[in-house]
Image: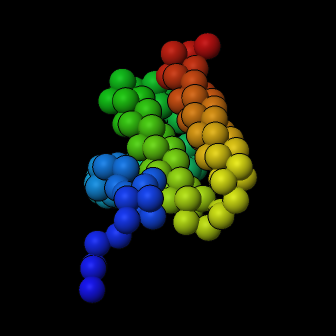
Amino acid sequence: MNLRTNIKEAQGLGSAKDGVSHWWLQRLTAVALVPLMLWLAFGLARHGGAGYEATVAWVANPMTTVLWVLSLAALFWHIKLGLQVVIEDYVHDERAKFASLIAMKFITVLLAAIAILAVLRVALGS
């Protein structure tokens, strides 16, 4: 009884050496998002009734701007990692999987860029 598989059967089915780093990045972004989202929630709640000028002044504070950008970058990176796992696990047609992964990556980068640009425009006063 031979417990080893033939190379022809196993070819292309081995590890891509990417799963562990993907898993760690997803956990790392999740851990980073906890304090960032708490800060964002409390900051937005604190400035919820404030006027436009007060809110713009808060966003224009350099520390606030940096935390906003970090929050958005970590959020969209985490979204990208999570959607990638969902697509890889549940889309079985290889062409549809490839197209979905490419579209998802473009869309998440585009949305992240739009969100970060919006924060920077408010912070820089343009």
Q: Is residue 17 left or right of residue 44?
A: left
The residue closer to the viewer here, 24 or 67, is: 24
Q: Find residue 6 and report its image quarter.
A: bottom left
Q: Is residue 11 visible?
A: yes
The residue closer to the viewer here, 113 or 19, is: 19
Question: Residue 22: x and y, percent?
Answer: 36, 51
Q: Is residue 42 left or right of residue 100?
A: left
Q: Is residue 64 visible?
A: no
Q: Residue at x 44, y 59 (%)?
A: 8
Question: Residue 58: x and y, percent?
Answer: 45, 33
Q: Find residue 34 and report its image quarter.
A: bottom left
Q: Residue at x 37, y 50 (%)?
A: 16
Q: Quadrant of the N terminus?
A: bottom left
Question: Residue 4: x and y, percent?
Answer: 29, 72
Q: Is residue 126 above or below residue 10?
A: above
The residue closer to the viewer here, 37 or 92, is: 92
Q: Residue at x 37, y 59 (%)?
A: 7
Q: Find residue 9 and report its image quarter.
A: bottom left
